[in-house]
Amino acid sequence: MNSRYQNKNIAVLGAGLSGTAAALLLRSHDANVSVLDSATENKLPESTIKNLRDHGVRVISGPDAETNRDSYDLVVLSPGIDPESALAQNFSSRNVDIIGELELAWQFCGLPVIAVTGTNGKTTTTELVAQMLNACGQRTVACGNIGKPLSAVVRDQSKFDVLTVEVSSFQLETIKSFRPQISVWLNFAPDHLDRYASVAEYRTAKLRLFDYQTEKEFAVVNASEQLPPINAQRLTFSAYDDRADFRLSDGTICFETTPVLRLADVKLRGSHNIENLMATLAVGHIRGLSFEQMAAPLCAYEPAPHRCEFVRRTRASILGRCAMS
């Protein structure tokens, strides 16, 4: 058991899914945990409050959370809590050590991690990777920014071989050692400017994905993106650049010059989904799967409602509905 936090006084900021998962993970390792949330208790789900208290977690809410002056050994920040918020500033102004929920979960993780980020397509790609790996005998789960928080998954990680984690810029802001075996950078576009002062600040947060990788790890990156130097071994993809490792040729995804997957055989539509498929194939290739193994589950993948789906073919074009998720 990882006992680094045994009997430590730890504050978890935010009583949402990630904060609750972090608190329960810490309690399972005998930490003294307080969850603080700016919302008043009557605005928080009653079931959440009961679950936390049943596990011995102290809950502090409303104005009391923002002015709490108790002494803590560590503060864990939920991704939905802005580091500039009054709640977070109450602790950062006191020089208390602050990490994020993703970083906390990583400290307890004994499995390889595939971390997927991108302004658009990260949910689809995370699901694609998870479905493909499971179909090919590598047990995994799509988690993190979708599904269960990583802090919840690592409490029962023995059932998996690898974890497939969607990560957001909010989660990456507070990492201090998070080092995925495979990082996936799909794309970048201006977003979340309600949280960040500039596009550059948002991009800097995203790029933290690569900060702790070494030459032993891998980075699957969009060849069209201008990225800074990365320590990890790169594998590139692009639907538009024929110099990428995974590229498009005559309606077929190719690895270098080898045909791998015909687009006519898959249900996903749209150029962005071609790149999602390429990134997924690159991950499987790194994980030791053959392209023949990967083809069947990728062809079987059904896009979720309101993602990208085939509607009908007209004389002029193929009509579809797409959502960039």
Image (cartoon, helix red, strand yellow):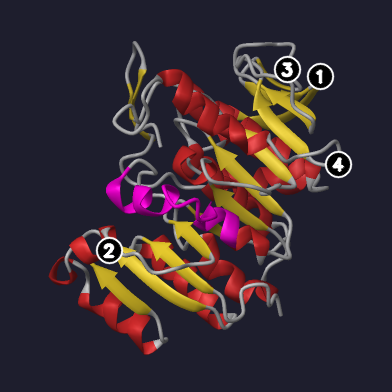
Q: Mark 2, residues whose alpha carbon is within 10 Å: few (<14), some, or many (≥20)? A: many
Amino acid on which disc 2 is placed: Ala
Q: Which residues are magenta?
A: 85-104
Residue 147 vs 26, above or below: the answer is above
Q: x, y percentage for residue 297? A: 62, 50
Q: Which mark is residue 257?
A: 1
Which residue is the site of mark 2? 65
Q: Is residue 87 magenta?
A: yes
Q: What kind of element bears circle 2?
A: helix
Q: Which mark is residue 244?
A: 3
Q: CA distance from mark 3 to mark 2?
A: 50 Å
Instruction: Please say if the residues under marks 4 and 3 sit with CB atoms less than 8 Å apart.
Output: no
Which residue is the site of mark 4? 216
Regarding residue 264, the answer to whether it shows in the image is no
Q: x, y percentage for residue 318? A: 37, 21
Q: CA distance from mark 4 to mark 3?
A: 21 Å
Q: Quadrant of residue 220?
A: top right
Q: CA distance from mark 2 to mark 1?
A: 59 Å
